[in-house]
Structure formats: C-alpha cells, structure tokens
Amino acid sequence: MVEALMRIIIAIVLVVIVFNIGKKVAFAFFGGSDALQSFENLAKELNSLKDTSKQTDTSKQTFLSLDEGTAVIGFSKTTREFRCYGCPQILSPTQFYYLVQKPSNDDCKDKPCMCLCLKGFRSSSLSDSESRISCDSFYCQTLNEDIAPKLSLEEPLKKRNVQLANYPYWENGFMFVRRKNSETPLNGMPPNDIKKITLFIERKTTGGNIYLGACPTSPCIQ
C-alpha cells in the first residue's frame, strides 16, 4: 500500500512538472497571452459554419487576439503559396506582392488550413515584384472547407475612406497581422497595432463549390 501510494504521489509530481514546463514554453512563445487560444477558437468557428435551411451563405462577426509581430495566415487546399497583392505598400504602378510558402506539415498537406506564425515573422527584400515572407515557427489547424481563391480588400478599404487605383487582394488564403515595428510585413490594410481585432468569417456556395473566407469586413467572399 505504501509503495502504491508513493507511486501515485510521484506520478502527480511529474504531471505538475510537465504542466509547468508546458506553461513556460507557452509563455516563451506568447508572453502569457491568449493568442494561441484565440487562434484555435477562430479555427473552430470557421469549421462550425453551416448552411441554414433558408440560405446557402453564412457570415458572422468574430474576434482575434494577436501578439506584436505575429500573424494568422490561411492557405487554400491545392495552393503551394499564399499571395498578398498590393500589400508591400510602395507608391508604384506595379502591384507588388508578398508570398508565403504553405507549410508541409500534416495539418496543411493537401488540405486547407490556417496557421499562426509564432515567431520570426518577416519579409525579404523585393525581387522584381515579389517579396517573400518567412516564419521561424508555424502552428497550424486544418479547415473543413477550402478557402476562396480570391478575397478583395476593396470594400474594407473604401469603408475606411481609402481610395486607390488598384486595391490589394488576397490570393489562395487570408492574412491578419499585428505590427511590431516598421519592418513588420502588412496585409494590405492600414497597420494594426491593437491586440484584439474584429473580423468576419463566411461560408459561401458559389459555382457549385463551398468556400470559407475571413475578412476585415462583410461581405467577405465576392
């Protein structure tokens, strides 16, 4: 009995130690914030969007918490990369774009997914019209439906009284960013410096296909 009791006590102590180590690792990544939980909640909300009996489109407002210098990026099923056209904000007739390589992990391989860049979110110098965004550590979740092939930022920018000849747009995914400094890559919208942002998620049937979208304003999928 004494030996069994000691084993139970040792097991409890080990669980506590492992739990505390896990908390320290999370704090190292997120500074003790709720960014990871917010990301997981967003993935669950996107996966829970359903058609109603009277309409084929579903849209709702939600929230996302981001730490400084981090981003959430969605990737469509068959794409190898997400592109953010017009997002390097440079005064030029050329529409420059950011390119983000889709992770090859189990959550994203041959699947639509969304990923949280935990650290090392940065962009390279422009080469022709392209700048590559890299991330040192991605945490990803699989999505149940594919992401719309194009999400325009025209309406969200017009609602902020931003007038442009060519409006930025997202190709094969979506991206939300919280700026840390002037070096942080942006997503085509005005720089975001706040922790908790409002966005809209949508599930829409178009051309016989079901698509998901996440956008700054509604409607999301054009």
Image: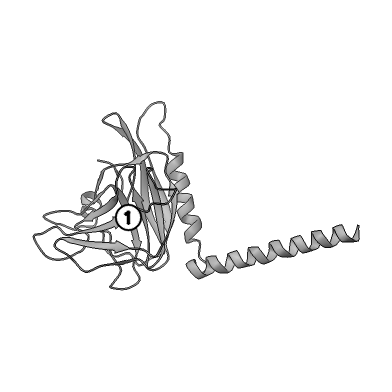
Regarding residue 216, the answer to whether it shows in the image is: no
Q: Quadrant of the C terminus?
A: top left
Judged from this view, the residue extending furthest toward the right is 1
| Residue at 44% in and 48% down | 107
Residue 69, percent across and down? 37, 68
| Residue at 38% in and 26% down | 54
Q: Which of 204 and 144 is in front in this view?
A: 144
Q: In this view, does 41 lie above or below 146?
A: below
Q: Which of 17 and 165 is in front in this view?
A: 17
Judged from this view, the residue extending furthest toward the top is 53
Left or right, 87 with respect to 54, comes to left
Q: Which of 206 and 26 is in front in this view?
A: 26
| Residue at 36% in and 41% down | 202
Number of marks in the image? 1
Residue 153, percent across and down? 23, 51
Q: In which quarter of the image is the N terminus?
A: bottom right
* Visual colour scheme: one colour
Find residue 96 and report its image quarter: bottom left
Find residue 146 and report its image quarter: top left
Q: Is mark 1 on a helix, strand or loop?
A: strand
Find residue 220 and report its image quarter: top left
| Residue at 51% in and 70% down | 28
Residue type, label 1: Met
Residue 221, percent across and down? 28, 41
Regarding residue 128, the answer to whether it shows in the image is: yes
Residue 126, percent across and down? 18, 66
Question: What crowding class fits label 1: few (fewer than 14 Cα within 10 Å), some (14-19), or many (20 or more)?
Answer: many
For label 1, the residue is 175
